[in-house]
Amino acid sequence: MQFLELKNFLDQKVAQYNQPDFISNDPVCIPHLFTRKQDIEIAGFFAAILAWGQRKTIINKCKELLGRMGNSPYEFMIHHSDDDLKGLLNFKHRTFNDTDLLYFVSFFKSHYQRFDSLEQAFVPKQSLLSDGILSNAFVDTLSAGISIEDSLNYFRSYFFSLEDFPHRTKKHISSPTQKSTCKRLNMFLRWMVRKDNQGVDFGIWNTLQPADLICPCDVHVDRVGRLLGLINRKQTDWLTAVELTQHLKQFDANDPVKYDFALFGLGVEKIL
């Protein structure tokens, strides 16, 4: 397809799939069960991290997990007792088990005792300010050039900054340093950062910007992206996700990741 023809085609598909009807059959339905910002963040994070396999199974496992937290994830993270933690034992989805889950809970409790939002976990300047290491003015200057790659690398380091983290849990949090596409975390960031009036993505974070997001590169997006000439790289890794996003920025520099809806929808429905 020529540039304008492809842009118009993808814009039509974004309009088709970026609709409230998309929510019920996608893991994004999990954070949509909540209205409190912190509940949305925690539920969304688990929904993204557990997004392996069939979407129906993912949704059911997330609902099971949240049910074990009394369907109040933020309150659970902040106020749980040792007895409450026993209710999480034996939870499992694919290779994610209760050892991983208990560490996630420890992380969330530690983080929310210091910060109001999970967004600060992806923004290095927030930690520097909290620790009193640097002045606000200097940190603002320092953070101006921070990319999503920086954010994801920082997040993984910060996530595993608690003492005695289980080594096995590290496989569940990817980063560009590992050359991963970071599909699940990029999907989570899309949910939290993108802003429109369609009702799918939440747009509740303001420090990270939609223009800087990287497109989640799952098997459907990767396949369709290659068919449309948006990916030329042979392997699928972090640089593949960056290449795809750079091509999508030619269609919309301010919101390139909206085309995730189009590529994913085309792939799932096997239109291409």
Image (spheres, grey):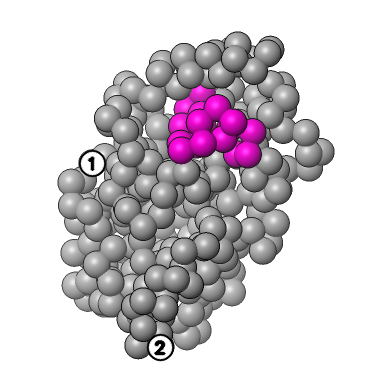
The quadrant the N terminus occupies is top right
Where is residue 107, by image quadrant?
A: bottom left
Q: How many marks?
A: 2
Relative image position of residue 151 (x, y in whole percent): 51, 62
Residue annotated with mark 2? 133
User: Label 1 is placed on what type of residue?
Assistant: Leu
Q: Which residue is at the front of the view, 181 or 229?
A: 229
- Specify the segment rendered in magenta: 245-262
State the image quarter where residue 2 is shown: top right
At which x and y percent is residue 117? Answer: 28, 63
Image position, residue 183 (x, y; %): 56, 46
Residue drawn at point x = 47 percent, y = 85 percent:
163
Q: Is residue 247 magenta?
A: yes
Helix, strand or loop for the magenta stretch, by majority: helix
Amino acid type at image mark 2: Ile
Looking at the rendered structure, which numbered label has been put on residue 33? 1
